[in-house]
Amino acid sequence: MVEKKTKAAKKSATKEKAASTKAAAVSEKDAVKKPAKNSSASKAAPKKASKTEASITAAPAAAKTKTKAKAKTATKAKAKASATKAETKAKAKAPVKAKAAAKAAAKAPAKPKAKAAAETPAKPKTTTKAKVKAKEVKATTAPETAAKEKAAVKSTPASKSERTRGVVTLKFLVDLAKTIKEAVAPYARDIKGKEIVDTTASGDVTFQIDRVAEKTLQAYLRKAALPISYYSEDEGYSTFTSKPPKNLLIVDPIDGTRAAKNGFEGCVVSVASTRVLERPTVADIDFACVMEILGDRIFLAERGKGSRYYTNGRLKRPKLSQNNEIENMAWSMTIPARPAELIFPTAARIIDLSSLKGGFFPCNSTSYSLTRLITGQLDACVDIANRYYRDIPERVEDYFINAGRGKIIGIAPYDMAAALLITQEAGCIVTDAYGNSFDDLLLLDSSKGNHRSIIAASNPVLHKKLLSFFNARIKQYEALLTQRSP
């Protein structure tokens, strides 16, 4: 009896199991035909399929086919989830750039069918660690970027200056002048270097202190090894480079040698530069530097940008005198190798008028006297001798040869090239004794035919008075000289 009941129970269980399997197959079939309408049904579908895997295997062929389709759908979903997960990890590792994250996701191993998912990844959440790292990267690169931008801005004017001014800058001129000053100042202070060792191309005397200055100039330029040529009082035109020069320097290593060799302060180093190499003139000068040898002043100018000077390293602006009265005028006149028999009778009256209330100072350095105009020490400076030689050369030549000890000596371009730019940029009025400018004066010609006269004043009114006085007085004296000559 018990055995029968057991068999009946087993049979009933078998029937229930068959019914359950059939119901599951039908349910699976419906699930394949009609996908779930919401996300929770979709997520439940793979789970249910895994629970009834054995029943699906035993189902009819049609149900089996549908089950394979379902398995493929599940595989696609799984591959998509795997690709998304891999991409999220790759992007979380990238510190800053989304582009790098996308590249990492694209390189992540995935099945071909999941490629579309990799190309359009879901936006991952940035972890706190990644945010901190990004901030660190930004903090590190920001100062570097700022520094580079600052350096670029700072270097722009310099590179522009090099394109427009060649390789020479004001700093270069100052360094050169300082080197020469340091070499010759001990000689001037100890009153050494008085020995005459040679004669310059212009006919002037070369002293031992001049030789020291010239050798220092050559050594500096040779060491600099820049494409530069130069023209100096003792050597004339020269260069130390095999490359085509980009700049020309006009140098007087010591302007005012007679003051320097005797320990007086009226001596300077004069350096000017130009980019024009073929027949350059005063109008072509770009930069100028005049440096006192026994003093602390440095005078600088750049064409079109004004002039300035430094005293003990402190910047000073030009301080031009507004005095226009001859009687109160402080002024100088160039003396060396100028015929005293001509210049002193010509200037005698004005010397008498100004020497008491103003001041008269013999000049041994044109550059030194010109630069005194912008310090306010002088109101004017003149060199009138060459006017006589140009007007009546046959009448006065012997006077000049006698004063120059066999040579006709006057103002050479290197004597005043730098000082001219400095004074003119400061606002001084500088012309020759005819009232003409020096713009057309050739810089590389030191012959007597290229010598000039000078009348310079700190203001136009005083300049006009001086020009008028000397013009009238020179003509009077020339007429007297002409009458005396046979």
Image (cartoon, helix red, strand yellow):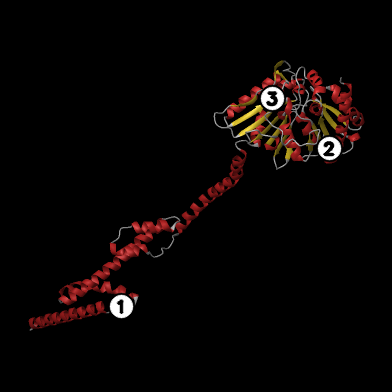
Q: Amino acid at mark 2?
A: His
Q: In the rendered image, is residue 227 in sight?
A: yes
- The answer to whether 463 appears left or right of 58 in the picture is right
The residue at 86%/27% (across/down) is: 478
Q: Is residue 21 above or below residue 143?
A: below
| Helix, strand or loop for disc 3 | loop
Q: Amino acid at mark 1?
A: Ala
Which label's residue is closer to the chain start, 2 or 1? 1
Q: Nearer the viewer, residue 249 or 6?
A: 249
Q: Nearer the viewer, mark 3 or mark 1?
A: 3
Q: How far across and how far down the image is residue 275, in percent? A: 63, 36
Which label's residue is closer to the chain start, 3 or 1? 1
Q: Nearer the viewer, mark 2 or mark 1?
A: 2
| Helix, strand or loop for disc 2 | helix
Instruction: Quickly name the residue at label 1.
Output: 36
Q: How far across and how far down the image is residue 197, in percent? A: 69, 16
Q: How far across and how far down the image is residue 225, in percent? A: 57, 29
Instruction: Quickly name the residue at label 3.
Output: 233
Label 1 packing within 10 angstroms: few (<14), some (14-19), many (20+): some
Q: In the rendered image, is residue 293 in sight?
A: no
Residue 438: name its quadrant. Answer: top right
Label 2 packing within 10 angstroms: few (<14), some (14-19), many (20+): many
Residue 431: name its quadrant. Answer: top right
The residue at 74%/17% (across/down) is: 194
Question: For the C terminus, which image quadrant?
Answer: top right
Rounded to the nearest angstrom, the CA distance separating label 3 from label 1 is: 104 Å
Instruction: Quickly name the residue at label 2.
Output: 463
Q: Nearer the viewer, residue 229 or 110?
A: 229
Q: Amino acid at mark 3?
A: Glu
| Helix, strand or loop for disc 1 | loop
Q: Nearer the viewer, residue 399 or 239?
A: 399
Question: For the N terminus, which image quadrant?
Answer: bottom left
